[in-house]
Image (cartoon, grey):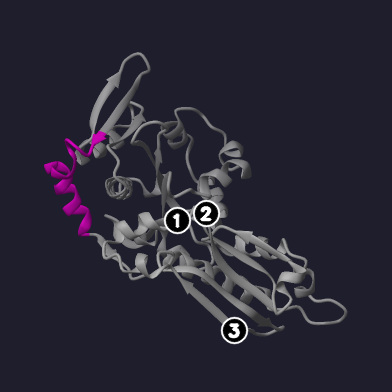
């Protein structure tokens, strides 16, 4: 018998719990905690941090429990907690009966927030009265299918921790010229694809960063899914401004993919209440300079550093920029959102 639950912490908001359940849950106190939302890796780690995990793997000739099913339940439970955090104060499944081929919830309870909070009509006002989750949930609203200028279909979505192998493979296919254009140095493959670096790249704090990736739909239909482009928006310390970066695989350049990712980053910045977006590119990167200027960026050449500094102001250019509006309309013709 197991327990899966969530309760409200005064500092961190919803905190999830997993461990040995049943009527003696307070006696044995064999549990681990984590901040939602969780993916399968984090759910598995949460399970491993308990003593009951050894028994779940099978002991004294007993079959192991359905570990994959428990992981999936924990992940889905964390999504429920994140989706309804404005309403749910506490929720738990106890006991959760697990066997070698099934996972059954025998009992559950849910405690809602105080009725005075629930009666607030304004959602923003309600959020200010309830402790927000410490981690912003995965931004599923960015998931969409997109058709390139050459008619190739891609899936654009936010990056996930599970994408690390795809990012490693992506860097194998990037030319030295593209590497130098992006980082303004000859960063070696071993450094770009190192696990210590990619942990920071793929595990994103969506309150601070947004990283979008584009996947080749045709390759993802099989087992060799390919990541072909990435764009990132990183908030700068002490300023309500974010820095953008875009990298497209050489074979996919010239299909409007870089422009599409930049447009999505601009939309995210606007929704997040930023004052502006900035970036630094080499003068030789004419394609990126041209795309950014059509979006409404101002470009200034820094002779001393030999770089082009680009800035997009939401207060000035922004949504009313004729060039950006035209480009937006052009790109929307190739965009078909999917239901999540």
The answer to which of 50 and 321 lies nearer the viewer is 50
Q: Residues within 10 Å of mark 2 (few under 14, many from 20)?
A: few
Query: Would residue 166 be visible to someone looking at this image?
Result: no
Q: Is residue 1 above or below residue 213?
A: below
Q: Nearer the viewer, residue 195 or 257?
A: 195
Q: Earlier in the sequence, mark 2 or mark 3?
A: 2
Was residue 324 drawn as part of the magenta stretch in this picture?
Answer: yes
Task: Say which residue appears at 35% left-offset and 30% top-offset.
Answer: 281
Distance, label 2 to label 3, CA atoms, is 27 Å
Q: Position of residue 59 (x, y in %)?
A: 84, 76
Determine whether label 1 and label 3 are within 8 Å by CB. Answer: no
The magenta segment: 312-333
Image coords of residue 66 (percent x, y): 68, 78
Binning the other alpha carbons within 10 Å of mark 3 as few (below 14), some (14 to 19) or many (20 upward) gives few
User: Residue 150 is drawn in which quadrant?
Assistant: bottom left
Q: What residue is shown with label 2?
A: 10
Which residue was labeled with disc 3? 107
Q: Residue at x 65, y 64 (%)?
A: 44
Q: Main secondary structure of the magenta part?
A: helix
Circle 1 is placed at which residue position?
131
The answer to whether the residue labelled 1 contacts the one labelled 2, judged by CB atoms less than 8 Å apart, is yes
Q: Earlier in the sequence, mark 1 or mark 2?
A: 2
């Amino acid at each position: 018998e197991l327990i899966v639950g969530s309760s409200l912490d005064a500092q961190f908001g919803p905190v999830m719990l997993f461990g040995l359940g049943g009527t003696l849950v307070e006696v044995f106190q064999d549990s681990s905690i984590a901040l939602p939302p969780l993916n399968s890796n984090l759910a598995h780690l949460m399970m491993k941090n308990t003593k009951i995990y050894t028994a779940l793997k099978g002991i004294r000739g007993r079959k192991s429990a359905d570990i994959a099913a428990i992981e999936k339940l924990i992940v889905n439970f964390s999504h429920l907690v994140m989706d309804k955090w404005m309403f749910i104060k506490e929720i738990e499944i106890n006991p959760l009966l697990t066997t070698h081929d099934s996972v059954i919830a025998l009992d559950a309870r849910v405690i809602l927030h105080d009725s005075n909070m629930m009666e607030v009509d304004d959602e923003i006002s309600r959020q200010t009265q309830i402790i927000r989750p410490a981690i912003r949930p995965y931004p599923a609203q960015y998931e969409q299918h997109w058709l390139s200028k050459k008619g190739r279909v891609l899936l654009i979505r936010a990056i996930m921790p599970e994408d690390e192998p795809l990012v490693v493979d992506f860097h194998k296919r990037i030319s030295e010229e593209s590497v130098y254009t992006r980082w303004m140095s000859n960063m070696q493959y071993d450094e770009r694809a190192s696990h210590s670096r990619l942990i920071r790249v793929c595990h994103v704090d969506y309150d601070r960063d947004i990283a979008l990736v584009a996947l080749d739909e045709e390759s993802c239909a099989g087992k060799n899914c390919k990541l072909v482009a990435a764009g990132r928006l990183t908030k700068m310390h002490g300023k309500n401004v974010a820095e953008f970066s875009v990298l497209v695989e050489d074979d996919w350049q010239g299909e409007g993919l870089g422009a599409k990712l930049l447009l999505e980053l601009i939309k995210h910045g606007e929704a997040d209440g930023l004052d502006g977006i900035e970036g630094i590119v080499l003068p030789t990167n004419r394609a990126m300079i041209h795309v950014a200027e059509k979006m409404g960026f101002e470009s200034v050449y820094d002779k001393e550093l030999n770089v082009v500094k680009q800035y997009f102001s939401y207060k000035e250019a922004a949504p009313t920029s004729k060039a950006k509006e035209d480009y937006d309309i052009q790109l929307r013709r190739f965009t078909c959102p999917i239901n999540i």
